[in-house]
Amino acid sequence: MTDAPDPSSAAGEGGAADTAGAPLDPAQDDQAAPKKKVTPRRVVRWTAAVLGALVLVAAVIVFAPFGYLVAMGSGQPPATIAATGGDGLWIGHMWVDGREDEANVTELAATVKADGIKDVFVHDGPLNDDGTLPVQLDPKAAWFVTTFHKDAPGVRVQAWLGQEIGTGPGVLDLADKATQARIVASVKYALDVQGFDGVHFDMEPVPSGNWGYVQLLEQVHSVTTHQHKFLSISADQIEPAAGMMALGDAIAGHAHFWSSGYLHQLAGLVNEVALMDYDTWIPTSPAYAGYTRMETRIALRAMPVGVHLLIGLPAYAPNPPTHDSGETVPAAITGVRLALGSGTPANVGVALYVDFAATLGDWQAYEDGWVKVLHPSSSPEALPEMPPLG
């Protein structure tokens, strides 16, 4: 602590009078504290300072979460996989429109069996915008199901049905009762006439909380349960943190995230959920692995008891910026394995999207990083690269 100055010394040696309370001379005040002029140079400096601060804030907002994802995805997965397995595979329309022959079906079935894939989602749509199924586009559907069952008994063959969701012409209105009824009729046709073991819905983009989708699944679940058939859905990514839904939807330009509560609600109406863990806009593999780790954990917590979860693997060519070169099958598998750890096996598998775009490298990464680790005694052979869907 320092001593306070002596008030009596304020007058100085010359004994100047105390001026406290006296009015200031404006001229003297201007001389003592001249006003700063607003010059162009000063405006430039102020503008640069403000912009710099904004850039710093933006960098913190962007790179802090990005760094967190990189850290989440940079660990070493356990030597074993704590999963029940039972994987999935989306396959294209060529299998039901006559472009593939019996030899190709046999080869597909052999790989599916070797890899432990339990569900094959066959593109049997898309549905018309009124909910009807354009059966003229899939004349070989029943033949494919029968032929595939012969070569791979016990593997579920599900009709993959979907359409763009919205209101107006050209899209499917899930809130319309007549449309819902026609979709249910399409489901019955796929099960009763085409012989599928179940139905897999891929409706996009479904906004989180959409009640029409809940109503539709309730009706279809009643049908599949009565017939002892399977019902599954593709699920949007789950909001990774509070407040991210609006941001994600704004960046994507459409509904992009579901809440975990909405996922739980829909999962309670189906037998299986396939999380579409791709088109994430994430440019690097470590960050994508971290994101997949996070999404897998959230999705597992949202699954009701007995509902099987599949994590979708991006087996298709990069398409920046939504699906960048860092979004790969190996990175996705790393994220899933990190999420599962080495504890009690979870009711989860992975699913390759999609056969006609998957490369030999994608298949090898799936088999080396997942199948051979989950089933060490197996020695699957990679499926030859499929021709593009034409």
Image (cartoon, rainbow, N blue to C red):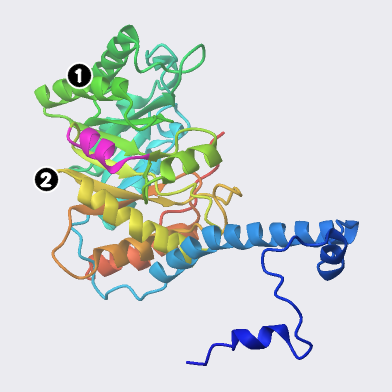
> Which is nearer the N-term, disc 2 or disc 1?
1
> What residue would you read off at disc 1?
219
Name the foreground residue: 264 vs 99: 264
**Seen in the image, is 50 located left or right of residue 74?**
right
For the residue pair 315 and 305, the one nearer the viewer reads as 305
Is residue 90 depicted above or below 209 in this figure? below
Q: Measuring from the top left, give residue 313's x and y in whole percent.
A: 40, 52
Percent across and percent down for residue 154 are 17, 43
Q: How crowded is mark 2: few (under 14 residues within 10 Å), some or many (20 or more)?
A: few
Q: What residue type is labelled 2?
A: Val
Rounded to the nearest whole Å, what is the CA distance between mark 2 and mark 1? 21 Å
- Mark 1: which amino acid? Gln
Q: Nearer the viewer, residue 97 or 9?
A: 9
Which quadrant: the C terminus? top right
Would residue 381 be visible to someone looking at this image? no
Q: Tell me: residue 231, above or below residue 377.
A: above
Q: Where is residue 105 in the image (x, y as percent from the top left)?
A: 36, 41
- Is 327 in front, or is 226? 327
- Residue 37 screen position, x and y as percent: 87, 58
Q: Mark 2 points at which residue?
A: 305
Q: Give the range drawn in magenta.
A: 258-268
How crowded pointer 1 is (Cα within 10 Å; few <14, some 14-19, many 20+) is rated as some
Q: Residue 179 carries which label?
A: none
